[in-house]
Image (cartoon, rainbow, N blue to C red):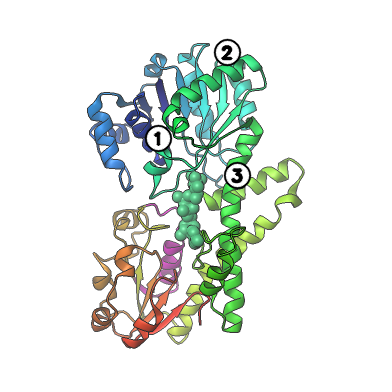
């Protein structure tokens, strides 16, 4: 298939390189010239394990190229919208500016046999409105919705070996058949590998994505709410998670209590889902997601309070080492990162904060110039009055408590991700605190 991909951010760049790697002829489009130049030279604009390799191989094969010229899309038959849908600046809903701009820029270059596919996460009703936009501009191109479910850190794997494929097809049978033909050809290797395929209408496909991310967020906030109860009782949330996770109706995944979820997806997606429910007159249906959001935000503030108590009530003149800034390990993404929120809060309250992250240091330096950055955990912890582990990178999990103790002023560790062994750290002389564990 000849596929153009509009938007070369996290989703689009990985998707473009991955689709070329399975034999398609792919054009990646983006308005950011620097990003496009870098991608054409095989430079990944973000940290993602395995992406550099698939990008290099796909460029080498001659089946992948990147451009800023929408006119180049005229040679392609499928066009995939992969642009971002961030939260609006002053409201909870999703900002569709980039989606609309992508479609408007594409329209002059579409032929009527082309298929436009949406992969961005959008509020329900967007696909229908985009069909109206196409028709109003005189295009008869077919539109289908095909949400993605990739996780940062596993983006290539999730793209090439997805848990499921979801097609949201048009009502008209001939249009649906054309969309299906294109989608089946694009995903032929995945379908041959018997990846489950779920087919519905536009609204269903759009809602699958909102529902999936909301469920994941709810699972995390559920276990974090249980952690709050554990903290009031002396129970251990990780043992509870293990015990309930053994019930296969519940399952063990996404039950890691800690400082909550962040990133460019879950926080904004639950808010956009709630906002859309409000517009549709079913506010109460998703009212519980407000609580999911509240629980999530409380965990971050809880860590700030724990640190304040540990430092005898005042941050002034105290040195705090923060291990981790990305919203999760194996990523340099700091959007809505709980770690960065906590670091900034502590710094705002007068602490001398030193942050270190294996991949996000440069980003932190650019975005939060007031935070000091250290090369590694030992440099960050040197002279620290307290150490906070906030992103569970493997190198932090592997830290030697005896060696780290030698560089700190006070051996006090707050493990915001419950990944260290309490017995080992206490034996090495540390005061060790974690989330929802005695
Ligand atoms: C999430 C979804 O997991 C993907 O399926 C989805 O495709 C993607 O959003 C998207 O909408 O594009 P991602 O944002 O990469 O993927 O991150 P997750 O792995 O879901 O982690 C989100 C946050 O939850 C992280 O901050 C992580 O530390 C936290 N988390 C995760 C927990 O606090 N506890 C857990 O048990 C699991």
Q: Residue at x 56, y 18 (%)?
A: 142
Name the spot of residue 155 as percent of width and height, x first: 40, 44
Q: Earlier in the sequence, mark 1 or mark 3?
A: 1
Q: Is residue 288 above or below residue 105?
A: below
The answer to if 40 sits in the magenta stretch is no
Residue 264 visible in this rendered orientation of the protein: no
Magenta region: 333-353
Instruction: For mark 1, give the secondary structure.
Output: helix
Residue bearing the label numbered 2: 140
Q: Which residue is drawn at 58% across and 18% down?
A: 177
Residue bearing the label numbered 1: 15
Task: Please rate how many residues cluster around mark 1, counting C-alpha atoms within 10 Å: few if below 14, some from 14 to 19, many from 20.
Answer: many
Left or right of 129: which side holds 432? left
Front residue of 114 and 46 = 114
Name the spot of residue 40 as percent of width and height, x first: 26, 31
The answer to if 339 sits in the magenta stretch is yes
Name the spot of residue 227 as percent of width and height, x first: 57, 73
Residue bearing the label numbered 3: 210
């Amino acid at each position: 298939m000849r596929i153009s991909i509009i938007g070369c951010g996290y989703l689009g760049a990985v998707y473009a390189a991955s689709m070329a790697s399975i034999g398609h002829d792919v054009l990646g489009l983006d308005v950011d010239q620097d990003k496009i130049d870098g991608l054409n030279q095989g430079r990944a604009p973000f940290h993602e394990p395995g992406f550099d390799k698939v990008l290099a191989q796909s460029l080498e094969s001659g089946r992948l190229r990147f451009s800023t010229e929408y006119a180049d899309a005229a040679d392609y038959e499928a066009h995939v919208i992969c642009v971002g849908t961030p939260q609006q600046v002053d409201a909870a809903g999703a900002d569709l500016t980039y989606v609309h701009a992508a479609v408007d820029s594409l329209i002059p270059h579409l032929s009527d046999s082309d298929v436009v596919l949406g992969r961005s996460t959008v509020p329900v009703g967007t696909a229908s409105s985009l069909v109206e936009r196409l028709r109003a501009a005189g295009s008869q191109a077919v539109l289908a919705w095909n949400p993605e479910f990739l996780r940062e850190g596993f983006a290539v794997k999730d793209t090439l070996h997805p848990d499921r494929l979801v097609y949201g097809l048009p009502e008209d049978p001939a249009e649906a058949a054309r969309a299906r033909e294109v989608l089946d050809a694009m995903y032929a290797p995945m379908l041959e590998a018997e990846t489950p395929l779920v087919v519905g209408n536009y609204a269903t496909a759009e809602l699958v994505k909102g529902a999936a991310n909301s469920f994941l967020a709810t699972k995390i906030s559920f276990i974090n709410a249980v952690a709050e109860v554990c903290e009031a009782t002396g129970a251990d949330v990780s043992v509870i998670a293990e015990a309930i996770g053994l019930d296969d109706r519940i399952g063990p995944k996404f039950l890691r209590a800690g400082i909550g979820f962040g990133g460019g997806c879950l926080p904004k997606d639950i808010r956009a889902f709630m906002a859309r429910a409000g517009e549709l007159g079913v506010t109460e249906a998703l009212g519980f997601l407000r609580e999911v959001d509240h629980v999530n935000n409380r965990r971050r503030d809880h860590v700030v309070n724990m640190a304040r108590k540990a430092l005898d009530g005042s941050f002034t003149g105290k040195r705090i080492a923060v291990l981790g800034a990305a919203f999760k390990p194996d990523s340099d993404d700091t959007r809505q990162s709980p770690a960065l929120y906590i670091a900034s809060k502590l710094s705002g309250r007068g602490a001398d904060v030193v942050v270190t992250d294996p991949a996000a240091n440069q980003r932190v330096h650019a975005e939060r110039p007031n935070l000091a950055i250290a090369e590694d955990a030992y440099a960050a912890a040197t002279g620290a009055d307290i150490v906070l582990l906030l992103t569970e990178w493997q190198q932090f999990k592997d830290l030697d408590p005896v060696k780290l103790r030698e560089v700190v002023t006070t051996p006090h560790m707050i493990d915001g991700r419950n990944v260290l062994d309490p017995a080992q750290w206490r034996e090495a002389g540390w005061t060790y605190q974690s989330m929802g564990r005695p």
